[in-house]
Image (cartoon, coloured by chain):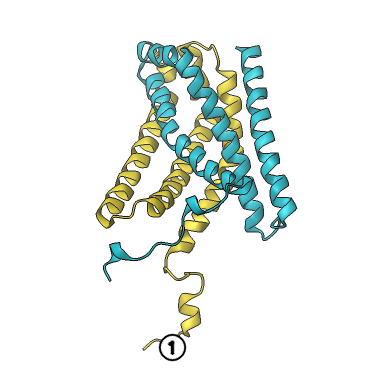
Amino acid sequence: MSLRTPLSRVRGLGAARSGTGHFMGQRLTAMANIPLAIFFVIAMISQIGASHAEVVAFIANPVVAIVFILLIASVTYHMRLGMQVVIEDYVHGELAKILAIVANTFFTIVIALASIFAILKIAFTSGAGM
Amino acid sequence: MNVQDRPLSPHLQVYRPMLTMMMSIVHRITGSALYVGTLLLAWWLVAAATGADAFSTVQWFLGSWLGLVILFGFTWALLHHMLGGLRHLLWDTGRGFEKPTIEALARATIAGSLSLTVIVWIVGFALG
């Protein structure tokens, strides 16, 4: 028997016990995405018409590489949470819903890992004559 | 009663379309489009990391008319979703729920996303 009051056990959890973390994560990444996406748009404009060597040199710049990795991490987490809500709202079959949520997690992890791996590879090898 | 047989509340078709409702729907649509659009960003980055040949393939696609249409849509979806998100962050603080404010924010989001998209592309063409 716990001495905690019923209120303290549910405070911050909501009726579903776990939604608050999702909500906060969505807002946290939303706030992070704003400056990161603005940087991304400006960065992409700066690379219009650039050659492969120029783009590689640009991404290899530590500031660009770090911000791009932060962008990928924040965006993929944000979109995983967002798509999960869309799935929960529109996919009603229990099995289909679970499979869609699993596929959503796999997709976002693959996008994140592939993108971050590519950035790191460029950043760590561009000096060695790619 | 079986879970599947439970009555559902009235859905979209019983409501008259309104601006704020369309904004909510478009926020989801742009979010979903951006979700799929990350495939393009991942492809671009992996191609750049692979080599000049792979990179020229993705650049060829992005420079084609289909690629440019997708990139234009990507730009608008990103800016619209971002401005829409700013509205949501404002609402999260408990502000901006008055009807005239909501309407004004909706119109400002549309005007802002469209004009910013055009500005981004004008700057892009001027520099590119």
Asked which secondary structure carries label 1, the reply is loop
B34 relative to B11, above or below? above
Where residue A57 appears, as percent x and y from the top left, is 50, 18
Q: Quadrant of residue B125?
A: top right
Direction from residue A93 to residue A118 in the image, left or right: right
Where does label 1 land, which residue? A3
How many labels sit on residues? 1
Residue B14 or residue A5, whichever sits in front: B14
Q: Quarter holding the C terminus of chain B?
A: top right
Direction from residue B101 to residue B110 in the image, left or right: left
- Return the chain for callout 1: A
> In the image, which lettered chain appears cyan?
B
Colour seen for chain A: yellow
Q: Quadrant of residue A64?
A: top right
Of the residues shown, which amino acid type is indicated by label 1? Leu
Where residue B111 appears, as percent x and y from the top left, is 69, 34
Q: Residue at x 68, y 34 (%)?
A: B112
Mark 1 closeness class: few <14, some 14–19, many ≥20 residues within 10 Å: few
A65 relative to A99, above or below? above
